[in-house]
Image (cartoon, grey):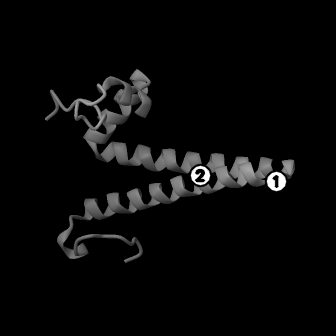
Amino acid sequence: MASEGLHEEATRLRPETVERHRAWVSLREEIEAIDWYDQRIDATADEELRAILTHNRDEEKEHAALVLAWLTKRDATLAREVAAKVVRGEGPDDEAASASPGDGSLAIGSLRGRP
């Protein structure tokens, strides 16, 4: 199979699960490429090369966004979570701030009221 990393036999998976797996793998690769470009941008002393690398990195961000959009069309929970975070402008720092120190929480937000 072209998409690596299945944890179960492909024959036991629904076709849509395999397709989402392909998308998750692609998203991971795009995010990894963004990170690599960020590092190269920081490391280079050549301004022309920095501009090229910045352009390339930003194209990878577009690719990641396209894959994420595809995934949200096929996963209602993911779509709801992404939309809620974008609309409320929440991020990891917001969730960590909502947890009380020493309260035993993992600082990942409340699961109350969720199915």
**Residue 98, quarter of the rendered image:** top left
Q: Residue 6 carries which label?
A: none
Q: Nearer the viewer, residue 18 or 37?
A: 37
Task: Say whether residue 93 is left or right of residue 56.
Answer: left
Q: Is mark 1 on a helix, strand or loop?
A: helix
Residue 72, how many percent across, how many down? Answer: 35, 43
Image height check: is 87 above or below 13?
above
Left or right: where 69 falls relative to 115: right
Residue bearing the label numbered 2? 34
- Farthest residue toward the front? 102
What amino acid type is highlighted by mark number 1?
A: Leu
The image position of residue 39, as x and y in percent, is 66, 53
Compared with 84, 62 (above or below) is below
Q: How far apart in space, not on screen, are marks 2 and 1 (Cα)?
A: 16 Å
Are the residues flagged by discs 2 and 1 in contact, CB closer than 8 Å? Answer: no
Quadrant location of the N terminus in the rendered image: bottom left
Q: In the figure, 107 relative to 14: above or below?
A: above
Above-or-below relation of 91 to 44: above
Q: Quadrant of residue 114?
A: top left
Tell whether 28 sits left or right of 34: left
Instruction: Report crowding for label 2: few under 14, some 14 to 19, many 20 or more residues within 10 A (C-alpha).
Output: many
Chain-order first, disc 2 or disc 1: 2
State left or right for residue 29 relative to residue 21: right
What is the x, y in percent for residue 107? 31, 34
The residue located at (30%, 70%) in the rendering is: 6
Please state which amino acid type lies under the numbered disc 2: Ile
Q: Name the residue under label 1.
A: 49
Look at 37% across and 30% down and name the residue there: 96
Q: Tell me the SS state at disc 2.
A: helix
Q: Indicate the position of residue 48 as horizontal and vertical percent values.
A: 85, 50
User: In the picture, which quadrant includes the C terminus?
Assistant: top left
